[in-house]
Image (tube, rainbow, N blue to C red):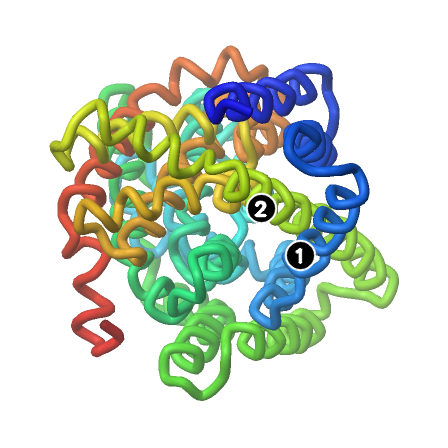
Amino acid sequence: MNIVLTTVILFAVFGILLFLGCPISVSIVISSIVTAISSLSWDQITFITMQKMNSGVESFSLLAIPLFILAGNIMNNGGIAKRLVNFAKLFVGWIPGSLAQANVLGNMLFGALSGSSVAAASAMGGCIYPIEKEDGYDPAFATAVNIASAPTGLLIPPTSAFIVYSTVAGGVSISTLFMAGYIPGILMGLGTMVVAFIYAKKHKYPTTGRVPAKEALKTTLEALPSLLLIVIVIGGIVGGIFTATEGAGICVLYCLILSICYKSITMKSFMKILVNSACTSGIILFLISASSAMSFVMAYSGIPAAISNGIMAISDNKFVIFLLMNVILLIVGMFMDITPAILIFTPIFLPIAESMGMTAIQFGVMLIFNMCMGNMTPPVGSVLFVGCGISKISIESVARTLVPYFLVLFILLLAVTYIPALSLGLPQLMGLM
């Protein structure tokens, strides 16, 4: 069958199923099977599809995903979020709109601990939004700040997004990816803080004032055990003491011990956390499994090569190609969750990026940055829905307030795309590249 027609069939069936409300993982499997019918027998399709779906999750590295999910859920219910919010306030109490600034810093810290943008938006928003409401903050502004800063946890390690990317990109070093995500993730948070500062200054939002030294010391000591988790997990992974998967296991144990010490977790709540973590892990791992089948069908049909040739035919200028890739990925991020997007589009765009001189590490950071922005945009942005759900305001009322944040983040995305040092500088400094 003609390659163009095969491509159209694959993405048309996939898009129609999504439009009809079919779960994304099921849509991936069905569209892959429908596309494969044109060139394979039914026996071959069923055998190969099941084989690829099984082999897609046969990876020791992927075991880190359910462990990090479990750790994030324990943090979300273990009193850690509140201590991080109080710690963040120490640094931004003098800035107009200091509660919003504390929200950003809290999301960066909690995201770095949990590796989940949804968990960060839920935990930080739940802690700080009621206080902002009491202090007269515009609900749309407070919600937009939370939504725009929560995805920093997908870039600041440890994060399961880089683990998924490492697997599909052919075993790219996870520790190098982790280090590469720090500066872009921090820039993302700082960009959000700048927009929030301008808005707060314009609307004359109050400061919370400086905290007395005695109280600051107490708050720091309370937050220190949580912050040590970053040092232990990331230091151990980068230092080669343990793998990312082993680090995830240590992360779970540490968070559990911390929550028990804080007396903020019970056996009943822990069982609920286990069930929720198992459900979330099952969804993500099935997505990975299904996407492995689609990746095979695309490779067998020659779709990645065809798309690559099509893009390269537009221009041979790498700046134009990278811009086009970013625009496509931003659109994809608006309609697709991060895990299937990584699994489907990495095999398509990574070879193009490498042919243009971009390393797999820098491409991975650029890809995740795009997906971070997709998390905060309608119609499928998970962080957008969580943030609005916590504030109990409509998506329409917050969408307009999100526009300045989106524009600033897009500028930072282009900086990460065209300035390799932003993602590669730290790994090179640490001798990882």
Viewer-side residue, 10 vs 204: 10
Q: Is residue 387 left or right of residue 26?
A: left
Mark 2 falls on what kind of element?
helix
Q: Which mark is residue 73?
A: 1
Which residue is tagged 2?
A: 296
Q: Name the residue: 61% across, 61% down.
A: 65
Q: Name the residue: 24% across, 31% down.
A: 312
Q: Name the residue: 43% across, 46% down.
A: 347
Q: Quadrant of the C terminus?
A: bottom left
Q: Is residue 331 left or right of residue 40?
A: left
The image shows residue 253, relative to residue 138, as above or below, that is below
The image shows residue 354, relative to residue 306, as above or below, that is below
Q: Quadrant of the N terminus?
A: top right
Viewer-side residue, 211 vs 251: 251
User: Which comes before the other along the chain, label 1 or label 2?
Assistant: 1
Identify the amino acid type marked 1. Answer: Asn
Identify the amino acid type marked 2. Answer: Phe
Mark 1 falls on what kind of element?
helix
Closer to the observer: label 1 or label 2? 2
Label 2 neighbourhood size at 10 Å, few (<14), some (14-19), many (20+)? Answer: some
